[in-house]
Image (cartoon, grey):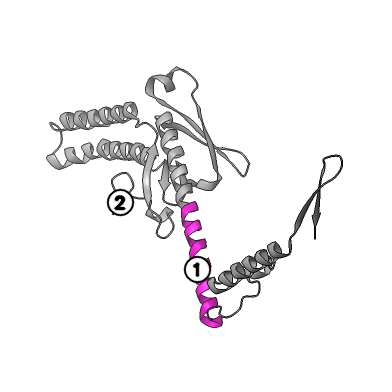
Amino acid sequence: MMRPGQIGFRRLLDEDEKIVRSFRRPFPLGAFFFHLLLWGGLMYAAGWWFLFDFTQYATLAVMGVPFIIGVYKLGTLFSRWYFNAVLMTTETLVFVDWRRMFDMRMVRLDYWDQDQIVIERTGAMPFLFSYGDLHFTKISGGEPYIFRKINKPRKVARILTKNREVMLDEKNFMEEGALKNLISQMVQTQVRHGGQPTGRRNFPAEEFFSDDQKPRSKREQKAAKKEEKKRKKQGDQHLEIEKQMDDTGGIEIDLD
């Protein structure tokens, strides 16, 4: 269910797209009260004036003319304010601009294509009444889209920039998760059709070692130690050291 301020935009959205927030121009209070007082006063004056000269039904008919015009003017002001908005949806930014009746322009800006937002204020009135123009630049290039006289432009720009970062992070996370699921499904499919790899591998680890460095079992390690001790013992038995003193007092060592 849509919240107040979002009703009336359903036909502008895609399927499963929802409005998160909406931003508008300042409400035209001055013009609203002007038309309210003008047409309300005319209706009251017409009723008071014609009450003494016409019947009750004729007086109501005369009062109905300024009433209808006043309702039309007030409804036009409200509709122009309400339906001209920036919609922050779950998919994109949607700019809705009604220039006049039956003349509407709608522009979409994807979050991945949204670059920086430039705030423009010219004159004293935008600073006094806190409104300004927002320039939405695009990463893909082209002319920026301008939404003029939006209410509280700094706050709106901050919210839209933060929302863009959140949406891009969620998109990257979903794409990463989808890629992991795809790889997992590919591996499972390969195992189901080809089976688990068994037997000797194509590139066993032993082929990367020399004969002396290859991993051995405990039995082979014990046999190798015994063989090494045997070779040392035989070498000590055949080693003979003869020391002879020569005439100069030197030492001569013969190794047979």
Horizontal and vertical percent position of residue 110: 52, 48
Q: Quadrant of the C terminus?
A: bottom right
Mark 2 is surrounded, within 10 Å at the Cα level, by few (under 14), some (14 to 19) or many (20 or more) other residues, namely few
Question: Which residue: 46% across, 56% down?
Answer: 174
For residue 189: magenta?
Answer: yes
The local secondary structure at tag 1 comes to: helix
The percent position of residue 231, horizontal first and vertical second, equals 67, 67
Q: Is residue 113 left or right of residue 202?
A: left
Q: Position of residue 74 (x, y in %)?
A: 31, 36
Residue 103 seen in render: no
Q: Is residue 228 above or below residue 119?
A: below
Three-letter amino acid code of the residue under disc 2: Met
Q: Residue furthest top?
A: 124
Q: Is residue 23 visible?
A: yes
Between 228 and 8, the one lying in front of the other is 228
Indicate left or right for 146 with 29 as reference: right
Q: Which residues are magenta?
A: 172-197
Q: Please say if the residues under marks 2 and 1 sit with CB atoms less than 8 Å apart.
A: no
Quadrant hosting residue 33:
top left
Name the amino acid, label 1: Ser
Give residue 2's mark: 2
* Residue 156: quarter of image: top left
**Figure quadrant of the N terminus:** bottom left
What secondary structure is the stretch in magenta mostly built from?
A: helix
Labels 2 and 1: the sequence-earlier one: 2
Residue 209 vs 57, above or below: the answer is below
Q: Which residue is mark 1?
A: 184
Is 66 above or below relative to 11? Answer: above
Residue plotted at (82% across, 40% down): 249
